[in-house]
Image: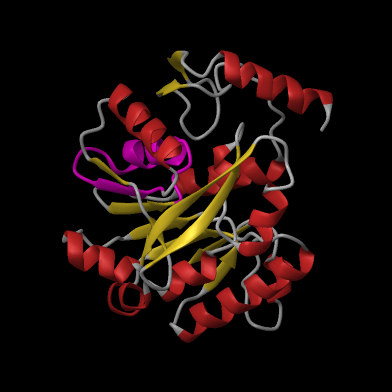
Amino acid sequence: MNIKKIAAINLNRVVKNYVYVSKHGPAKGLKRKGGLAFLPGFVPRSTGMEREEAFLEKLNLTGQTVYDIGGDQGIYTLFFARKVGGQGRVITFEPNPTSYKQIITNVELNKFHHVEVRNIGLGEQKSKLTFAFPGFDPGRGSADEKIREQILQEKGARVMEIKINPLDDEIAEAKLPQPAFAKIDVEGLEMSVLLGMKQTLLNHRPQLFIEIHGADVESKTQNIRQVVSYLLECGYGIHHVESSANITNSNAPDAKEGHLYCT
């Protein structure tokens, strides 16, 4: 682990209860508790991250219902809450209880009354999965078998059991509004989440913004091939945010890094 990363981890521990206004990132200008967004330039920003944020910023989501699937600390939940405005709605799904509580805190700090946070993971079928995450970085938590094993090799890694429900069932059981847009960032379980929302995809056609993950290049390639094939079968067009390329089965591996925007 490099010196900058160690410094960031140690500083994160010191400021975990510090409340401030974020100076950069998707939640810029909004209140946060914890994290390092009060220090512009402390954490290097990649071109990919800048493109991701710039792409999402251009979308018109005013008044719409957005699902944040894989909420982490709630940074994008705050971003979407601001984007949709008071007439819209944001529903966030986060299985890690620690991260779930952090999202609730950040939402309450900003007095966003149109946000609902649900402490559950999404997948293909109702089940329980083993979830592992680095103690200093809950956002990297995963129930994907290969990624989970990698995480468990790290010092301070934690493990827990999480509940999983298909999104189609979650919507029906909780009487949730259908999404117009869904951000999916689930650390390797992208295909499982999509399979569990098939009726939502076919009947309501939400826009999708998906980050692709995998334990290694082979896993990412397999993941992107499956995701692209499935979404094409569901009638979606697929755009790779980082390269601006239209993605089909023939060039799917080119999109194994980065984000897909699907309509």
50 to the left or right of 193: right
3 to the left or right of 27: right
Q: Name above or below for residue 203 compared with residue 185.
A: below
Image quadrant in which you'd find residue 213: bottom right
Q: Residue at x 68, y 48 (%)?
A: 151
Q: Assign the N terminus to one quadrant of the image.
A: top right
Q: Which residues are magenta?
A: 70-94
Q: Residue at x 46, y 53 (%)?
A: 161
Q: Residue furthest left?
A: 175
Image quadrant in which you'd find residue 249: bottom right
Q: Assign the C terminus to one quadrant of the image.
A: bottom left
Q: Residue at x 34, y 36 (%)?
A: 82
| Residue 45 drawn in magenta | no
Q: Position of residue 25 (x, y in %)?
A: 54, 31
Q: Position of residue 179 (x, y in %)?
A: 29, 60
Count of numbered circles on the image: 0
Nearest the eye: 187 or 97: 97
